[in-house]
Image (spheres, rainbow, N blue to C red):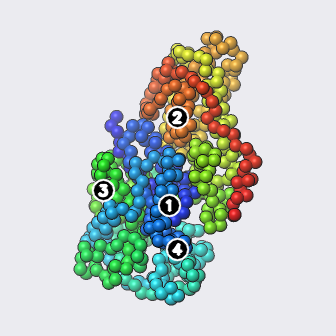
Amino acid sequence: MQRQNIYIGVAWPYVNGDIHVGHLAGYLLPADIFARFHRYIDNNVLMVSGSDCHGTPITVEAEKRNKSPQEIVNLYHPKFKKLFNLYGISFDLYTKTTTENHKKVVQDIFIRLAKKRLIFKKKSKQFFSPQENRFLPDRYVEGTCPYCGASDARGDQCDQCGRVLNPEELINPKSRLTNSPVELKETEHYYFDLPKLKGFLKNYVAKVGPSWRHWVYQETLGWLRRGLEPRCITRDLDWGIPIPIEQLPRDLKIKHAENKRIYVWFEAVIGYLSASIEWAKNTGRWQDFWYQSKARHYYFMGKDNLVFHTLFWPAQLYGAYGKQIHLPDFPVINHFLDLEGQAFSKSRGITVDSYYIGEKYGVDPVRFYLTWIMPEEADASFSWSGFIETNNNVLIATFGNFLNRVLKLSQELNDFSAEDLKETTIKSIENQVDQAFQFLSRCQFKNYAQALVGLADWGNKYLNQTTPWTEERNSSQFKKIMTNALLVVLAINLAAEPLIPKSNQKLSQMLGIKIDHWPKKGVGKYLTDFLSQIKITNPTPLFTKIDPNLASKEKAKLNS
């Protein structure tokens, strides 16, 4: 079977603060699990992302700290890479938006769209602070949302209800830096003419949307029904990618372009393409992923980025490159994860540092729990008691307990034979492994984690029914029972690789084998061939129990 080219674009995190477990559950872990799965089934995978360095969240953070934006980038970008290394997030390239390559690709797309008259200039009113004597980017302004009444809506979007806002819609706008009132003042900017692409977007969504998660498809249709408006794509800033003013048609040039920058919502998504081009300089052909009809494109993000990926990014790609470029096939969009029922907030101390929890309690228990509660169809909540309970009562009591029982009982045996296998064992394992395979193929990661535990649960029931501990250890009956149980262990060792890779490697070492790929067919025969290679050494528990009392101690740190 021909290998498929799988492109995985992962949302670009702002470098204005540490990455918390909500980011891990929202887009980083599902992307990594999916990438590991496709490499495991022998597909060509390109997974890229990078630090989003140009957004106003970075300039706001810089001004709060009395630092330059570049200093903020220099602080957080290495921390992100260190965190990804800890959790094994397997990027083929993790870059940043301050590279010369990214700048070149963004400006090229800007020029292409301008020459096709999909960008126009227009005078409009933007937020201006009389006290600070300057225009303020949207994120420097907060006010009341006209739709849901939230008091902390930003100048461009309300996080509470998800509506994208125009500046004149915000009620009682104030500067986030000085808390002083702001006013609307005329300035000239460039706009992306989305209405011109309405026909294309309707056809695109009608073609690929039905395969998306239902709520993602419905929300995208809602945007189309409400109607698309031109979107401003430049801002009065001095930090970001400059407008390529000299290369624009004469009638599209505006005054004071040197004081303006390409806005981050338009620019950051272009990183998916620019990162691919950067990766290809030393590694391969980016065109194999972007100009091949049989390739598949998956994008991972939180729900606040939905419209930018289901409508705006396809419009940018099609508008700049035409129908030859490969458009997004599947936006894997998660809802939000909160913390103990509260929204994550670094300023209010409502956060769990991802590096801290991974170092203290183990990376794979965190990966497992966040997948177990992943907010795929609705918002979910991280709780310390839930994390510890899942670790102790699911990961250890069901999953780890089965593995440890089988390895301990079987450690003195050798020469396991396929002749001792029961047909019911083989069939049950094939069905459950195939189920896990299908869940991963459809980006249903919670169901995949449950399928893994289902394998262990089946194995525990088998042991309880056959009671091998009542048999003589040198009897043929004991060996038959343990051979069947070991086939379940092999199935877990096969299917758990994308989710808990570090623990799975330890399991492989204890078994004395290495399963290097996941066959799409014939799993039973494939696993059976490993039986004769098993040499069990030093069987030890894969996971460590966590004291339940630690839940209240960790929770007490919140709001501090």
User: The disc labelled 1 sits on which kind of residue?
Assistant: Tyr
Write the residue at 68% across / 57% down.
340
Mark 3: few, some, or many residues within 10 Å (few <14, many ≥20)? Answer: some
First in sequence: mark 1 vs mark 4 = 4
Which corner quadrant holds the N terminus?
top left
Mark 2: few, some, or many residues within 10 Å (few <14, many ≥20)? Answer: some
Which residue is tagged 2?
Answer: 505
Mark 1: few, some, or many residues within 10 Å (few <14, many ≥20)? Answer: some
Task: Give the number of the mark in front: 2 or 4.
Answer: 4
User: The disc labelled 4 sits on which kind of residue?
Assistant: Asn
Which residue is tagged 4?
Answer: 66
Marking on residue 76: 1
Question: What is the distance, in whole Å, between disc 1 and disc 3 at their CAs?
Answer: 33 Å
Write the residue at 46% across / 41% down.
37
Q: What x and y, as percent, mark residue 395? A: 64, 39
User: The disc labelled 3 sits on which kind of residue?
Assistant: Ile
First in sequence: mark 1 vs mark 2 = 1
Question: Quarter of the image holding residue 193?
Answer: bottom left
Which residue is tagged 3?
Answer: 325
- Give 335 or 483, whichever is nearer the viewer: 483
- Give 84 or 521, whichever is nearer the viewer: 84
First in sequence: mark 1 vs mark 3 = 1
